[in-house]
Image (tube, helix red, strand yellow):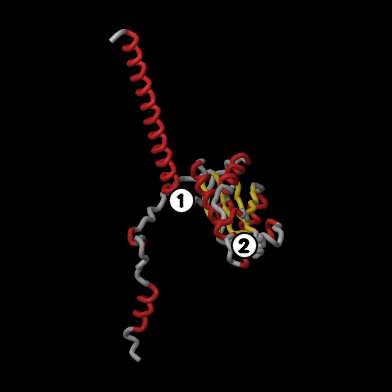
Amino acid sequence: MNKYKILSLFLAIALLAAQARIFMGDKAQEVSTSEAVFQNILTRSSIREYTAEPVSRTTLDSLCRAAMAAPTAKDQRPWKFVVIDDKAVLQELASALPYAQALKTAPAAIAICGDPTLMNEDHRPTEWWVEDCSAATQNILLAAHSLGLGAVWLGVYPAKTLVASVSNTLKLPSNLKPLSVVALGHPKGTAQPKDKYAKDNIRYNVGDFPNAQAEEEEESTEGGGF
């Protein structure tokens, strides 16, 4: 074998080795990314106390971008987002939501609103704005956690009094309904996520779960003495 053939052989081997390293590097990156995504989901928890450090508008815009990446039925995107970083408005909102004390220390919040009046292709109002806005809310929670922020989902819809209070506080037009408010800030202290996985809540192919309500009703009729 002459020197040119030997050189060509070494070059071919080197090229294959380089390609293998690139492939393995890409696979390692995929594994690393998937693990990071799972960890972000599994370690998220509701944070209700925050430091006084503000959340920048650049970060708040990024959270809204994440929210708008949520799935949406028929691509209607019925959502609108009211970003609140004015302390006076946050305090007013805390008064409008009696169970939302997190807003008293939160430096920012995002109200996720939907438009139930949007028409689908059948010229009927959309029926899926709640699901779409719920998915957007969850995206905000996960994105906030990935950025080292704390957040908590504060429910508004379907409680009519809360919907009215939040709508009035934020001066929403009549076609919008506030589904939720997410309080945001830098966590004060640490919170341990709950492991909510339960094997009993899973079935394959057939949902033959026990009927807890029927069992309770049966127990309530036993031994009545009548």
Q: Is residue 116 visible?
A: yes
Which quadrant is the C terminus positioned in? Answer: bottom left
Up-down relation of residue 20 to residue 50 (above or below): above
Residue 128: percent from left, percent from top: 57, 61
Please tell me which residue lies in front, 120 or 136.
120
Q: Identify the secondary structure beneath mark 1.
A: loop
The residue to which callout 1 is attached is 45
Q: Earlier in the sequence, mark 2 or mark 1?
A: 1
Q: Residues within 10 Å of mark 2 (few under 14, many from 20)?
A: some
- Picture quadrant where residue 6 is located: top left
Q: Image height check: is 125 above or below 74?
A: below
Task: Give the distance between the C-alpha atoms of the residues marked 2 and 1, in whole angstroms.
Answer: 31 Å
- Residue 196 is situated, as x and y percent measured from the top left of the image, at 39, 56
| Left or right: 10, with 54 as reference point | left
Q: Residue at x 60, y 47 (%)?
A: 108
Q: Which of the two residues, 166 or 54, is positioned nearer the viewer here?
A: 166
The reply to whether residue 54 is visible in this rendering is: no
Q: Look at the numbered disc 2 and give the secondary structure of its residue.
A: loop
Residue projecting furthest to the top: 3
Image-based side of 142 in relation to 95, left or right = left
Q: Residue 200 at x, y = what percent?
A: 33, 62
Residue 89 placed where, x, y %?
67, 52
Disc 2 marks a residue whose amino acid type is: Thr
Between residue 131 and residue 50, name the one nearer to us. 131
| Three-letter amino acid code of the residue under disc 1 | Ser
Report the label total.
2
The residue identified by callout 2 is 126
* Quarter the N terminus occupies: top left
Q: Residue at x 64, y 49 (%)?
A: 84
Considering every residue shown, the one lying at the far front of the view is 1
As drawn, the residue found furthest toward the bottom would be 226
